[in-house]
Image (spheres, rainbow, N blue to C red):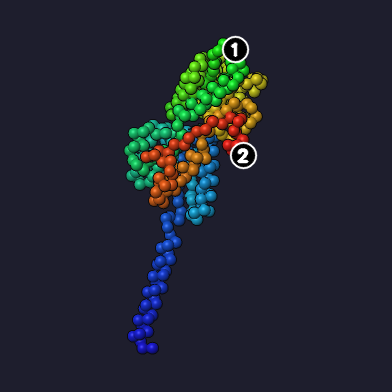
Amino acid sequence: MEYRVWRRRTAGLLLLALLLLAGCSGSSREGPVTVRIGVALYQQDDTFISTVVQHLEQFAREEEQARDIKLNLNVADGRGSQSAQNEQVDRFLSQGYDVMCVNIVDRTAAAVIIDKAQAAGVPVLFSNREPVEEDLARWEGAYYVGSDGAQSGQLQGGIVLDAWRGDPAGLDRSGDGVLQYVMLEGEPGHQDAAIRTEYSIKTVTGAGISVEKLANDTANWQRAQASAKMGQWLKDEEIGPRIEVVFSNNDDMALGAIDAYRAAGIEDLPVIVGIDATPPAREAIKEGTLTGTVLNDAKGQAEAIFELAYALSTGRDVKEAVPRLEGQYVWLPHRTITIGNVMQEFDD
Ligand code: GAL
């Protein structure tokens, strides 16, 4: 073969090989291979929050397999301290995380985190503890995933209403036509605490039933604190024997109330209602100690958080990833859970 022809052919083959190689490497790399998600929690041992995190971790494991990517989920516990959480957020930003999920300790302190996230160009996704609206509006890269507190209160009130209508004499132990109750409240300042308290009672009184509040106090979402508070009320002659309904802003405190009745040796429980539908609360419904609860959709929230985080960190369309997204908000609906549906609703 003539040298000139040989050189042309070799050059052509080389070019072809190079083009093929370039084509191959380009098509196998769509989006980042590793997605790093920083998760900052207000308090990891909170029962509901730990349920959300378990679902989040499960989604990450499943999606790693399904989407053939590496998902690095780093969970940090703020242990109730906003300054500790701010440091964790700083660490996520300095370590180049793709997206942050923040279950903020103090819901009035979001502006600082949003401004830092914006400066670093890292989307930030709040959940469960809702930042004030003006703060979230500071940057379109900030989102909130949660559930409507008023709806949970209304559904909780609805459970009590059904119990009253189903067995008026059984519930109205004093027979005075008035519903005597105590209220165990969540953390002061948390959007859900005041709203659930207000709407559960409004639902009952709105249906024409008179109520008498015997006592109310905060137990900060916690079972042990609720048990201690309830123990004091049970010892009080003016309160304990007169309680017909225990309203609780969440399940852990409702379970604390049941603990206190047990500790006092009282077996005949009044109507006790919670919110969350955590696994232990579902067990209590099955054993008949908890009258009912309202599903705070831990799995649905985790899925929305995960899908949003994944879409944001890979540049995918957020609305397509999470069709429930309205502006910067994702709202997950609640559902009533009682003995009538607890078995069908959950497969555990
Ligand atoms: C509420 C939930 C509580 C507690 C709290 C923490 O929505 O019902 O059980 O987890 O959030 O912020």
Q: Are marks 2 and 1 in contact (CB under 8 Å)?
A: no
Query: Residue 61 — which label?
Result: none
Residue carrying label 2: 348
Image position of 190 with respect to 70: above or below: above
Query: In front here: 222 or 344?
Result: 344
x then y, percent, for residue 10: 38, 80
x then y, percent, for residue 224: 57, 27
Q: Secondary structure at mark 2?
A: loop
- Residue 170, by quadrant, is top right
Q: Is residue 200 visible?
A: yes
Query: What residue is shown at x 48% (from left), y 35% (from top)?
Result: 333
Amino acid type indicated by mark 1: Ser
x then y, percent, for residue 214: 53, 15
Marks 2 and 1, Cα distance to the nearest angstrom? Answer: 38 Å
Query: What residue is shown at x 57% (from left), y 28% (from top)?
Result: 292
Q: Going by the picture, which residue comes out furthest to the bottom?
A: 2
Image position of 313 with respect to 84: above or below: below
x then y, percent, for residue 134: 34, 33
Query: What residue is shown at x 60% (from left), y 37% (from top)?
Result: 344
Query: In front here: 43 or 138?
Result: 138
Q: Residues within 10 Å of mark 1 (few under 14, many from 20)?
A: some
Q: Secondary structure at mark 1?
A: loop
Amino acid type indicated by mark 2: Asp
Query: Residue 174 — which label?
Result: 1
Query: What residue is shown at x 37% (from left), y 32% (from top)?
Result: 132
Q: Is residue 236 visible?
A: no
Q: Earlier in the sequence, mark 2 or mark 1?
A: 1
Instruction: Give the total of numbered labels.
Output: 2
Image position of 300 with respect to 201: above or below: below
Which quadrant of the figure contains the N terminus? Answer: bottom left
